[in-house]
Image (cartoon, rainbow, N blue to C red):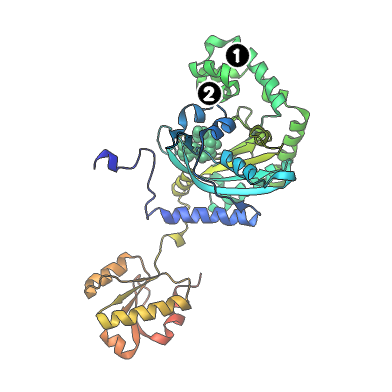
Amino acid sequence: MSKSLQAIRGMNDILPEQTPLWRYFEGTVAGLLDNYGYRQIRMPIVEFTELFKRSIGEVTDIVEKEMYTFADRNGDSLTLRPEGTAACVRAVLEHGITGGGQVQKLWYIGPMFRHERPQKGRYRQFHQIGVEVFNLDGPDIDAELIVLTWRLWGQLGIRDAVKLELNSLGSSEARGRYRDALVEFLSARLDLLDEDSQRRLKTNPLRILDSKSPDTQALLADAPKMADYLDEESRVHFEGLKARLDAAGIPYVINPKLVRGLDYYSKTVFEWITDKLGAQGTVCAGGRYDGLVEQMGGKPTTGVGFAMGIERLILLLETLEQIPESIARQIDVYLCAFGEQAELAGLALTERLRDQLPGLRLQVNAGAGSFKSQFKKADKSGALYALILGDDELAQQVVGFKPLRGQGEQQNIAFDALAEHLAACVVQG
Ligand code: ATP
Ligand code: MG
């Protein structure tokens, strides 16, 4: 196929074989967030480029090299959203729904776009579910975000495969003092730093902490530690968070080098990491961003949130074979009808069944066909039972009820008794 008729590299179709697992995952998360009192918000996929520069930070990987930015027909610079927080903050400000200290507990789902090198677990269009909370500044809400993700891992059966890393970045003043100390330490050892880190020393020195270079990492062993620079308020906040995680029985490790890729974090940062997916191990990441709303032109408004990568979590479910059996089968019953009269009666019958059994997954054969071909399609559909309707059955006002997966013999069921019979066989759930 010519290149222009293929999907863009790193942007994937999610095929019908895969969508049941996606819908199961998304439904599970949505249900959980409903239960905790979070409300969904939907933002556009495209925003003014300036929004991302202002919020994510000019000297971040995302803004420097990963954004899909283009000129609109009227010359505005637009960008496909690389993440959700910026647009969410813009939306709450634009609609004034965080004014006067109003608490908002929000979530969103959708595609994000980053021009990265595509590989397993890393794509150019990928999907996130994100959660953002505004106007709650205590560690209790940081803890709730972590507790609810922990519950989610439990529901999905992947708890044993993920671990929680935590750090506190302190207030922006504390981070500034720490940044100065780090820069002083590293400047004295400039020639030992990798090239990227040398550049970052001037632009975004904290990012050096998560440098991939072993030499730089060795050097950092003796560098000043963020924990020694934390302001009192952030220290107390962090202790409060840890106490709550202990109380909830959630294991964690403190990772003093966890800084996150975006500029806007303060105090709590965290990541859920798995070792089951190779290099792309972070399945969920977030933190507190108390200064962001103000930085974007709003009144001081605290914020905290996280985003999980759906592709990585789907990969994890597949890797751990945590795929519920119930999502594999999509059809309960398949109607085979032979001849025009039977087809017409079959349509009336199946529509009545759908009224009576709203949960029934019933596929009606389309395109007619011989006995053999219709049975083949019934079998291939994965249905548990075939319903058979021909002239003989029609004359007796019955359908043939044929188990397709070896659950007993074929029998005739009267039209009037069919709903009850099906309810007992297939729609218990
Ligand atoms: P990474 O370090 O893996 O690049 P990140 O710090 O850039 O992640 P965030 O911006 O915090 O990621 O996004 C939250 C989550 O979204 C990540 O933990 C990951 O699960 C997912 N994610 C981020 N980028 C991608 C991508 N290009 N493809 C698939 N999932 C992604
Ligand atoms: Mg990244």
Residue in view at x 44 percent, y 60 percent: 327
Give the x, y percent position of residue 256: 64, 28
- 156 lies left or right of 252: left
Measured along the vertical axis of the image, is residue 200 above or below residue 110? above
Give the x, y percent position of residue 345: 33, 82
Q: What residue does disc 1 label?
A: 186
Mark-to-mark CA distance, 1 and 2: 13 Å
**Frontmost residue, 4 versus 411:** 4
Identify the amino acid type marked 2: Ser
**Frontmost residue, 268 versus 83:** 83
Residue in view at x 48 percent, y 52 percent: 322
Q: What residue does disc 2 label?
A: 211
Residue in view at x 43 percent, y 34 percent: 70
Give the x, y percent position of residue 132: 62, 44
Judged from this view, the residue extending furthest toward the front is 74
Tag 1, which secondary structure? helix
- 161 lies left or right of 270: left
